[in-house]
Amino acid sequence: MNYTELYQQIRKKGSFLCVGLDTDINKIPSHLKELPEPLFEFNKAIIDATAQYVIAYKPNAAFYEADGASGWYQLEKTVKYIKENYPEILIILDAKRGDIGNTAGLYARAFFEKMDVDAVTLAPYMGSDSISPFLKYENKWSVVLALTSNASAEEFETLEYNGVPLYETIIRKNISYANENYGDSREKVMFVVGATRPEKLSQIREYCPDNFLLVPGVGAQGGSLEEVAKYGLNSHCGLIVNSSRAIIYASTGEEFAEVAGIKAKEMAEQMRVLLD
């Protein structure tokens, strides 16, 4: 999926909502735990209930890796289900990989070729060697961690060198590197900027005006959708706002998918107003 296709989907749905599939076997409704593939069955129900309101899904790899081979299989099955039934929806694998050389190349091959996701989250702290193997793929996205929503992010991400915070250096260098070596960075690179720091978004937009920002932290983590939109929207929306627990675990009863659909609709309706 390229930049234009993503923006067209946002315009069509009037939404920039991403639902995080952080599917925890200990939190899904009890009646699903008896099934052979409980993670997939939960995901399938959530996807079918929310697809008309979302432009992206973001499965977090850790929740599937924790269940070993079975969990990984259910993750692959989830990706395939989205691809076959809702091919217009972006799939972001939240894997936070950050290795170099052949290892980074194999991660890129695993996620972009074998699993066929559209985007993957990456840790940039070993430099461009961690990112470049992913940038080689056409119509695939590297989602680079910049200013995350967790409290301890300030231990590193906001540290300044010559008056410039680390997250700003990360954003500037990755835009420059992608532009110089792989074409328009807007088509290749997104950045993670947490909703719990909305005031930083306007500063970031000064030197990152066009790239999409993946914004976690709205909902259970307390981030404000209105504040994120106020400071982060650009002429092509430029935001993908993720909500996980507030949607997928809004109910733990047998009606969990229906309730998730209602919550996704409510957030999408707020987004439509903000886009207008």
Image (cartoon, grey):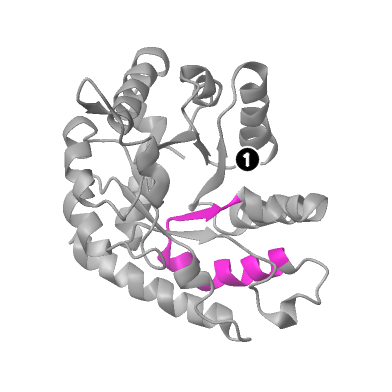
Pick whichever, 212 or 236, lies toward us: 212
Which element carries disc 1, helix, strand or loop?
loop
Residue, x 31% and y 55% (percent of image)?
A: 196
The residue tagged 1 is 116
In this picture, which residue range is highlighted in magenta? 39-60
Residue, x 39% and y 63% (percent of image)?
A: 221
Residue, x 81% and y 50% (percent of image)?
A: 69
Whole-percent x, y for residue 138 in the image: 50, 27
- Please indicate whether residue 214 sits to the left or right of residue 274 in the image: right
Q: Amino acid at mark 1?
A: Asp
Residue, x 35% and y 50% (percent of image)?
A: 194
Q: Identify whether 150 is placed above or below 130.
A: below
Pick whichever, 116 or 148, lies toward us: 148
The answer to whether residue 192 of the structure is visible from this angle is no
Whole-percent x, y for residue 32 in the image: 73, 77
Q: Main secondary structure of the magenta part?
A: helix
- Please indicate whether residue 187 sits to the left or right of residue 61 in the image: left
Quarter of the figure with the C terminus: bottom left
Reply yes or no: does residue 42 show up in magenta: yes
- Please indicate whether residue 102 sits to the left or right of residue 207 in the image: right
Give the quarter of the image for residue 71.
bottom right
Whole-percent x, y for residue 136 in the image: 52, 21
Pick whichever, 170 or 39, lies toward us: 170
Crowd rating for badge 1 (residues with CA inside 10 Å; few <14, some 14–19, many 20+): some
Q: Identify whether 89 is placed above or below 122.
A: below
Give the quarter of the image for residue 234.
top left
Reply yes or no: does residue 91 show up in magenta: no
Q: Identify whether 254 is placed above or below 27.
A: below
